[in-house]
């Protein structure tokens, strides 16, 4: 399909896309997931990488929704605050919100702190990826066992016991790795205060990363975006497909530890 044909189809869809972009946020969102990807967007005379900031939400019943997005030059405190303000203006209830989930990014953290004032769960898999780089290959499997004992513990008490075990076993050999785990350990354990069947969903940012992986997959065939309207069409198309899948299966919790760790 030629670019001119794609442009005509996109322009014909514009009223539908604009209405979808400004739709009210679904009621009852209790968990907010935030992440960003970079994609090539053509501007007059040049092409530049643009940050696409994405927000997903989950209700207490386990319904997952794509809530909104923002296209900007880069991830920053201002851009993340602009996205969160848009969600609030469209009806996101900060009083119902219980937890925000993301990787460790200062712009996201400031937006969550200043505009939402809810606990901020940092992605455990991102922590694992950063930590394992500081452990020699022969010891990584054993270190991973200790790491798993903390963040995949059945109770908070078990997690705290496992933290002590990690410090005792690895602090001398790998002080930087242990310090990295300990530096913000409470921010990686907020999920344990939520219902247990949500722990798998909240422990990592995998849900939103899988959504963004689908955006990247579509981008490989679409190539460079020629306008912000084409970006909107891409996000809309992926969102429609994902929400249809999500609607068939409410999140009820399941054991996917191996899949989580495989992403590390």
Image (tube, helix red, strand yellow):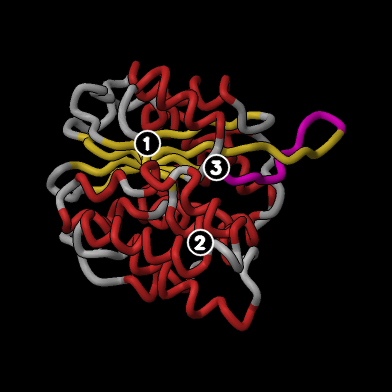
> Helix or strand or loop: what does disc 1 sit on?
strand
Q: Nearer the viewer, residue 208 or 175?
A: 175
> Which quarter of the picture shows residue 57?
top left
Q: CA distance from mark 2 to mark 3?
A: 19 Å
Mark drawn on residue 128: 2
Q: Earlier in the sequence, mark 2 or mark 3?
A: 3
Main structural element of the magenta stretch: helix, strand or loop?
A: strand
Q: Residue at x 34, y 68 (%)?
A: 149
> Helix or strand or loop: what does disc 3 sit on?
strand
Within 10 angstroms of label 2, few (less than 14), some, or many (20 or more) residues?
some
Of tags 1 and 3, the one toward the viewer is: 1
Q: Which quarter of the rendering shows the N terminus? A: bottom right
Mark drawn on residue 120: 1
Q: Nearer the viewer, residue 242 or 18?
A: 242
Q: Earlier in the sequence, mark 1 or mark 3?
A: 3
Is residue 136 in view?
Answer: yes
Q: Residue at x 27, y 21 (%)?
A: 91
Q: Earlier in the sequence, mark 2 or mark 1?
A: 1
Note whether 240 is above or below 139 in the view shown: above
Is disc 2 in contact with disc 1, using a CB cutoff of under 8 Å? Answer: no
Q: Residue at x 44, y 65 (%)?
A: 168
Note whether 184 is above or below 108 in the view shown: below
The number of numbered badges drawn on the structure is 3
Within 10 angstroms of label 3, few (less than 14), some, or many (20 or more) residues?
many
Magenta residues span 36-45
Q: Nearer the viewer, residue 7 or 53?
A: 53
Of tags 2 and 3, the one toward the viewer is: 2
Q: Residue at x 50, y 20 (%)?
A: 82
Viewed as shown, does residue 195 lie left or right of 209? left
Mark drawn on residue 36: 3
Note whether 224 is above or below 54 in the view shown: below
Q: How far across and down, in percent of the image, does residue 229 sit? A: 57, 34
């Amino acid at each position: 399909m030629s670019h001119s044909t794609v442009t005509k189809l996109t322009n014909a869809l514009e009223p539908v896309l604009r209405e979808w972009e400004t739709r009210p946020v679904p009621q009852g969102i209790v968990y907010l997931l935030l992440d960003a990807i970079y994609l090539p967007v053509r501007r007059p005379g040049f092409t530049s990488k643009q940050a696409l900031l994405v927000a997903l939400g989950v209700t207490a019943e386990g319904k997952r929704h794509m809530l909104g997005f923002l296209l900007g030059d880069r991830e920053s405190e201002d851009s993340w605050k602009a996205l969160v303000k848009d969600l609030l203006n469209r009806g996101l209830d900060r009083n119902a919100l219980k937890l925000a989930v993301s990787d460790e990014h200062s712009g996201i953290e400031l937006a969550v702190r200043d505009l939402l004032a809810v606990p901020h769960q940092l992605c455990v898999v991102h922590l694992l990826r950063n930590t394992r780089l500081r452990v020699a290959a022969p010891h990584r499997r054993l270190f991973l066992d200790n790491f798993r004992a903390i963040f995949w513990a059945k109770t908070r008490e078990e997690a705290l016991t496992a933290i002590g075990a990690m410090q005792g076993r690895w602090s001398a050999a790998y002080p930087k790795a242990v310090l990295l785990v300990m530096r913000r350990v409470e921010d990686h354990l907020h999920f344990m205060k939520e219902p247990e069947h949500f722990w798998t969903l909240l422990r990592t940012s995998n849900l939103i990363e899988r959504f963004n992986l689908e955006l990247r997959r579509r981008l490989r065939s679409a190539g460079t975006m020629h306008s912000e309207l084409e970006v909107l069409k891409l996000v809309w198309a992926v969102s429609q497909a994902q929400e249809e899948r999500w609607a068939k299966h409410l999140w009820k919790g399941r054991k996917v530890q191996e899949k989580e760790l495989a992403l590390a």
